[in-house]
């Protein structure tokens, strides 16, 4: 699966789950090229591409995605 396709699935999952977020929650979808953003790749231990990570800025936590590459699986992970 391409990075672009996985990013689209992730964006759709966020939209589907948007009603579950609390008012005032900030949700940001970022896409970066790990061949260019070397420091970010090292900082977040990115070893495979594409990679999904969910950041919770309220608790300074990063959740790595290790599930399947379907919209249903990604939606479940975002929840």
Image (cartoon, helix red, strand yellow):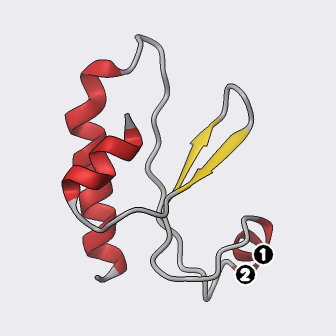
Determine whether the residue tagged by mark 2 lies in a helix, strand or loop. helix
Q: Which of the image's four quarters has the N terminus?
A: bottom left
Query: At x 49% / y 28%, what residue is drawn?
Result: 26
Which x, y percent locates residue 21? 38, 21
Tally of numbered discs? 2
CB atoms at circles 2 and 1 under 8 Å apart? yes
Residue 42, percent from left and from top = 78, 75
Left of 78 or right of it: where is 38?
right
> In percent of the image, x 45 and y 35: which residue is there?
27
Left or right, 61 with respect to 3, comes to: right
Instruction: Give the quarter of the image for residue 35.
Output: bottom right
> Within 10 angstroms of label 2, few (less than 14), some, or many (20 or more) residues?
few
On screen, residue 36 versus residue 38, left or right, reads left
Q: CA distance from mark 2 to mark 1?
A: 6 Å
> Residue under circle 1?
42
Frontmost of labels 2 and 1 is 1
| Residue extending furthest toward the bottom | 35
Q: Quadrant of residue 61?
A: top right
Question: In terms of secondary structure, where does tag 1 sit?
Answer: helix
State the residue at coordinates (25%, 73%). 5
Mark number displayed over residue 38: 2
Above/below status of 26 relative to 4: above
Task: Note whether 38 is above or below 21 in the view shown.
Answer: below
- How crowded pointer 1 is (Cα within 10 Å; few <14, some 14-19, many 20+) is rated as few
Say which quadrant the C terminus sits in: top left
Position of residue 10 measured from the top left corner of the image (x, y, whole percent) = 32, 55
Query: Who is closer to the viewer here, 2 or 36?
Result: 2
Residue at image location 53% in from the left, 79% down from the top? 33
Q: Is residue 10 above or below residue 23?
A: below
The front one of 64 and 12 is 64
Residue 54 is tagged as: none
């Amino acid at each position: 699966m391409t990075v672009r396709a996985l990013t689209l699935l992730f964006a759709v999952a966020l939209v589907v789950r948007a009603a579950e977020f609390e008012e005032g929650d900030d949700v940001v979808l970022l896409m970066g090229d790990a061949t260019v953003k070397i420091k970010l790749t090292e900082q977040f231990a990115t070893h495979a591409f594409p990679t999904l990570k969910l950041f919770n800025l309220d608790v300074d936590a990063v959740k790595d995605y290790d599930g399947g590459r379907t919209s249903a699986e990604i939606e479940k992970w975002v929840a």
